[in-house]
Image (spheres, helix red, strand yellow):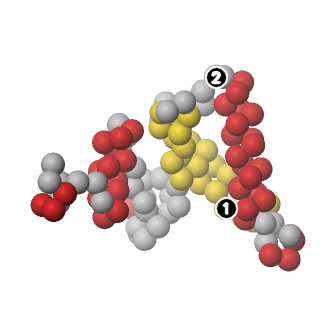
């Protein structure tokens, strides 16, 4: 498609591009009214083995990472490697979000 006529993937069309690449509709909902939310305000897409498998809602409460993970198929992959990889990524996010005074 001709990107100059609006047919290409652009930042303003990110949800459409996400669906094109991964086969699943994702939309950034940071500014969506609560009554219209599908996932939550800052749901992060989660990829595993070149597939979109779900999303995570992460927040920092009392200096600790709180996470809510949801899956497209309603369950996590069965591979032991997935659990280890998820724990590793959550630990990285905890370190990244650590409050300034706690570093």
Residue furthest to the right: 102
| Residue drawn 64% across the image and 22% down it | 78
Is 25 placed left or right of 34 in the picture?
A: left
Residue 9 drawn above or below residue 75: below
* Corner quadrant of residue 24: top left
Looking at the figure, which quarter contains the C terminus? bottom right
Disc number for residue 18: none
Q: Position of residue 25 (x, y in %)?
A: 36, 45
Q: Position of residue 36 (x, y in %)?
A: 38, 61
**SS for tag 1?**
strand
Q: Nearer the viewer, residue 79 or 40?
A: 79
Q: Position of residue 27 (x, y in %)?
A: 39, 55
Q: Earlier in the sequence, mark 2 or mark 1?
A: 1
* Corner quadrant of residue 96: bottom right
Q: Nearer the viewer, residue 18 or 72?
A: 18
**Structural distance between the alpha carbons of marks 2 and 1:** 26 Å
The reply to whether discs 2 and 1 touch (Cβ–Cβ < 8 Å) is no
Residue with the mark numbered 2: 78
Q: Position of residue 46 (x, y in %)?
A: 54, 43
How many neighbours does mark 1 have within 10 angstroms: few (below 14), some (14-19), or many (20 or more)?
some
Q: Nearer the viewer, residue 26 or 38?
A: 26
Residue furthest to the bottom: 101
Tally the marks: 2
| Residue drawn 34% across the image and 53% down it | 15
* Corner quadrant of residue 69: top right
| Residue drawn 52% across the image and 55% down it | 43
Residue with the mark numbered 1: 59
Question: In this view of the protein, can residue 34 be seen by the observer?
Answer: no
**SS for tag 2?**
loop
Question: In this view of the protein, can residue 42 be seen by the observer?
Answer: yes
How many neighbours does mark 2 have within 10 angstroms: few (below 14), some (14-19), or many (20 or more)?
few
């Amino acid at each position: 498609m001709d990107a100059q006529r609006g047919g290409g993937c652009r930042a303003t069309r990110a949800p459409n591009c996400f669906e094109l690449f991964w086969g699943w509709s994702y939309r950034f909902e940071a500014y969506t009214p609560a009554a219209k939310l599908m996932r939550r305000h800052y749901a992060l897409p989660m990829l595993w083995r070149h597939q979109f498998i779900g999303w995570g809602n992460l927040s920092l409460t009392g200096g600790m990472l709180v996470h809510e993970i949801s899956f497209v198929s309603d369950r996590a992959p069965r591979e032991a490697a997935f659990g280890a990889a998820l724990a590793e990524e959550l630990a990285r996010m905890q370190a990244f979000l650590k409050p300034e005074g706690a570093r």
